Image (cartoon, rainbow, N blue to C red):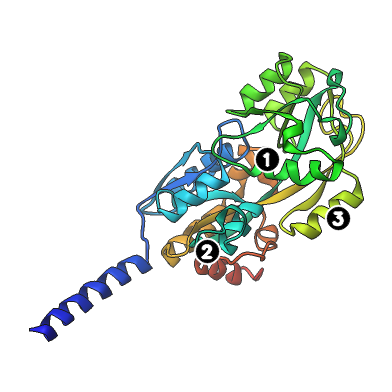
């Protein structure tokens, strides 16, 4: 009797394990970010590619609080793809930072997409010319469901002698609302990922005069040494109206991730479809031009999904 019971338990365990090993979805939910951010239109474009060019799959882009929420959704398989910044992915996969109390997140990279540089965009009449000028200023930076903004900003401000408590940090509920608050003088500046051609920042810089504080080279070197998932970025002069000087900033690689147990053939087909239809990505947002096969495999600090690797090997870029 004991042998029979043991055999039944073993069979159930094996079945459960085999089911857990492979996730074969029919619907792909893509975790993005608030609708005003570049993640959302790119997610919509990816959903269209999946629906139109991957047989048997439907897809939809979902507005979220960005990386942190997307990681949680991927872990629970409540989203099958998600936009994740390299700092958040690095911490989650290495059980450090806010993920120190948790096991390594069961996520894998599908592709490395565009680069997301964080910077301060301030009202010119706020008196903010440098990060050292942020003391006592009203800064929109606290996203309720994501802390990437705060982490990136404080990684910079601490080198200028400015602590979080020295600033009046305001909630950033949506980037459109944040920009409007700066325009209406209810805030002095917004700290956010600013990408070339971003509609909300085009609106801001054409509505009021702005200033773009720059980070010095020596401080950028210190930040990257401490946190290798950040990279240097320079906003060239004139990228936005009134931006009269180049502005140096730190940024992150934007990764498209999935659960490590996602079916290999599914990930392969999705990856292949994305790169066979990059014209759709390019039309969705200016950052879509950065989605190339060569760039997709450059960020190998984190592990890639086998299904994506299979496609990249076929294309000779892995």
Q: Which residue is depicted at the point 45% across and 55% down?
A: 75
Of marks 3 and 2, which one's residue comes earlier in the chain?
2
Query: What is the spatial separation of the Cα atoms under label 3 and label 1, in whole angstroms?
Result: 19 Å
Question: Looking at the rendering, in which quadrant would you find the C terminus?
Answer: bottom right
Q: Which residue is depicted at the point 60% across and 44% down?
A: 281
Per the image, label 3 sits on a secondary structure element best described as helix
User: Mark 2 Cα within 10 Å, few/some/many (few <14, many 20+)?
Assistant: some
Of marks 2 and 1, which one's residue comes earlier in the chain?
2
Q: Residue furthest left?
A: 1
Left or right: 74 as drawn, with respect to 218: left
Q: Which residue is depicted at the point 16% across and 77% down?
A: 8
Q: Which residue is mark 2?
A: 104
Per the image, label 1 sits on a secondary structure element best described as helix
245 or 192, which is in the foreground?
Answer: 192
The reply to whether dot 2 and dot 1 touch (C-beta < 8 Å) is no
Q: Residue furthest bottom?
A: 3
* Residue 151 in picture, x, y percent from top left: 68, 45
Q: Which residue is mark 1?
A: 150
Query: What is the spatial separation of the Cα atoms under label 3 and label 2, in whole angstroms?
Result: 28 Å
Q: Is residue 34 above or below residue 125?
A: below
Q: Which residue is mark 3?
A: 221
């Amino acid at each position: 009797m004991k042998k029979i019971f043991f055999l039944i338990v073993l069979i159930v365990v094996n079945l459960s394990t085999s089911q857990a090993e492979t996730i074969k979805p029919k619907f792909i939910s893509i975790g993005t970010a608030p609708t005003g951010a570049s993640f959302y239109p790119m997610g919509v474009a990816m959903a269209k590619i999946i629906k139109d060019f991957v047989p048997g799959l439907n897809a939809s882009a979902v507005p979220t609080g960005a990386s942190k929420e997307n990681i949680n959704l991927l872990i629970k398989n409540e989203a099958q793809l998600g936009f994740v910044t390299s700092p958040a992915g690095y911490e989650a996969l290495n059980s450090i930072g806010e993920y120190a109390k948790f096991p390594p997140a069961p996520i894998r990279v599908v592709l490395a997409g565009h680069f997301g540089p964080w910077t301060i965009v301030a009202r010119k009449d706020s008196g903010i010319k440098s990060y050292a000028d942020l003391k006592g200023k009203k800064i929109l930076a606290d996203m309720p469901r994501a802390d990437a903004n705060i982490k990136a900003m404080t990684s910079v401000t601490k080198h200028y002698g400015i602590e979080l408590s020295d600033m009046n940090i305001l909630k950033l509920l949506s980037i459109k609302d944040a920009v409007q608050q700066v325009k209406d003088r209810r805030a002095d500046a917004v700290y956010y990922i600013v990408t070339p051609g971003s509609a909300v920042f085009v609106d801001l810089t054409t509505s009021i005069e702005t200033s773009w504080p720059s980070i010095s080279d020596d401080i950028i070197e210190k930040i990257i040494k401490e946190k290798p998932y950040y990279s240097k970025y320079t906003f060239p002069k004139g990228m936005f109206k009134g931006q009269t000087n180049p502005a140096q900033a730190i940024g992150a690689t934007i990764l498209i991730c999935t659960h490590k147990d996602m079916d290999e053939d599914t990930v392969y087909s999705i990856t292949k479809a994305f790169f066979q239809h990059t014209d759709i990505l390019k039309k969705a947002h200016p950052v879509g031009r950065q989605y190339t096969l060569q760039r997709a495999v450059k960020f190998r600090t984190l592990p890639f999904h086998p299904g994506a690797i299979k496609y990249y090997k076929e294309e000779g870029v892995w």
